Amino acid sequence: MSDRRSIPAVDVLLQTPQAAQFITLFGRPLTLEALRVVLAELRTTLEAGGPVIPDVQEILRAVGLRLEAWLAPTLVPVINATGVILHTNLGRAPLSRAALQAVSQLNTAYSTLEFDLQKGARGSRAIHAEALLCRLTGAEAALVVNNNAAAVLLALSALSKGKRVIISRSQMVEIGGGFRVPDVMAQSGAKLVEVGTTNKVHVADYETALQSPAALVMRAHPSNFKVIGFTSEPSLAEMAAAAHRAGVFVLDDLGSGTLLDTARFGLPHEPTVQESISAGADLVCFSGDKLLGGPQAGILVGRNDLLVKIARHPLARAVRADKLCLAALTATLLHYLKDEAEREIPVWQMISAAPDRLRERAQAWQAAIHAGEIVPGLSTVGGGSLPEETQPTYLLALPGTQPNRRLGRLRAASPPVIARIESDRVVLDPRTVLPDQDPVLIAALVKLLV
């Protein structure tokens, strides 16, 4: 066993050039802590009969690794080569260049977040995206919060606490992260009233339930699942007509929500926000970071009197959107207003990408790495939207065995590359790889295949 007295002291290690470099990079307090932790571990190892004391360089190398591990970020950019456009685990929608620029400009200076330049007095953050949302959807008013779950909870809390909310039994769903519609209703204080059956609901079911006083009729659009076979349900317009005859408001939770017709891109038609407003929904809520292609946000549009009441609820402050969200969302909405969403918003660039163009990109990767096979495949929209719907694509299938080991090596690249396995091979889908990521993706593949 080595003598613990031969372990170098902290003060001695601090005099080395490496320690001076650590202090410059990581600061003196953290460097001191790392030195003490590494030396304490060394003493414990020696007491347990461990090997001889490493030299100073080895100790300092261990200190450097410890410092890097402590400060290594856990939230980092990745290359999404899975073909899942709205990949929930990978952050859903990437922002457009204009949205990124808006965030950057706002984040490096003070702003008019809650300041009225004309009056020289306090203003409201609610105005920054409201006019654009109203123009795009035809709604009277709009409110932005931090995500769609918050939008639903806020609307129910403000409008239906202690009151009945009528919803079809087929819409009592659970989405990602254990978010359940019945639980949200219970948390808001609303009294849940289910109508119809799992597979069928009729206008008469709503009319019967509406014979007793109610605050809302709610529709939860099945954006991440399908009920097929012997099914039927009334249209939103029919539901709204029944509710309005009884003097009751309609809340339409679109979930993902879209401002463009997905049928234009060979996908099934996803109800648009504009259609919900036209069909008579008094409130419509949807996400900002899914098919809208913007930042994480929950968006409420609809009647002005209802949104004024919602905005005044105490919960509204707890779930309000921050300045960076509002900046990115405003820039994203401008793309729609200027009819350039398909060209400028990454989500719509990916959805609208032609298979021939995707094949050309996959072939360019193949030529650059001198390996692999181009095979037809399928991309998915993902993100709780258009369930089970796919789009044709072309994949680069890598040669070799042990695909799980290769996926691990790709995840260890800088930046990490996230791919998938098909037919026992690693495959990469160009649909979800941003064009400016091609060079670093190719470099990671070359390193993998060496």
Image (cartoon, rainbow, N blue to C red):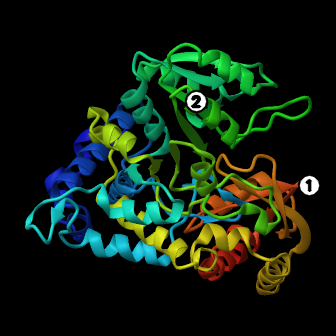
Decide if residue 426 is on the left or right side of residue 188: right
What amino acid type is highlighted by mark number 1?
Answer: Ser
**Residue 328, which numbered label?**
none
What residue is drawn where x is 55% and y is 13%?
212
What amino acid type is highlighted by mark number 2?
Answer: Arg
Residue nearer the viewer, 193 or 415:
193
Decide if residue 122 is on the left or right side of residue 146: left
- In the picture, which quadrant includes the N terminus? top left
Element class at badge 2 = helix
> Where does the image place residue 62, in percent across and percent down from the top left?
38, 55
Decide if residue 422 is on the left or right side of residue 216: right
- The answer to whether residue 324 shows anywhere in this view is yes
Instruction: Indicate whether 80 appears above or below 273.
Output: below
Residue nearer the viewer, 25 or 430:
430
> Where does the image place residue 271, in percent across and percent down from the top left?
68, 52
- In the picture, which quadrant includes the C terminus? bottom right
Instruction: Indicate whether 275 appears above or below 184.
Output: below
> Where does the image place residue 270, in percent across and percent down from the top left?
72, 53
Select label 1 or label 2 by which is in front: 2
**Residue 245, which numbered label?**
2
Q: Residues within 10 Å of mark 2 (few under 14, many from 20)?
A: few
Contact? badges 1 and 2 (CB < 8 Å): no
Q: CA distance from mark 1 to mark 2?
A: 56 Å
Q: Residues within 10 Å of mark 1 (few under 14, many from 20)?
A: few
> Where does the image place residue 314, in percent across and percent down from the top left?
26, 33
Q: Which residue is mark 1?
A: 423
Instruction: Residue 229: name its quadrant.
Output: top right
Element class at badge 1 = loop
What residue is drawn where x is 51% and y is 59%?
138
Instruction: Residue 163: name its quadrant.
Output: top left
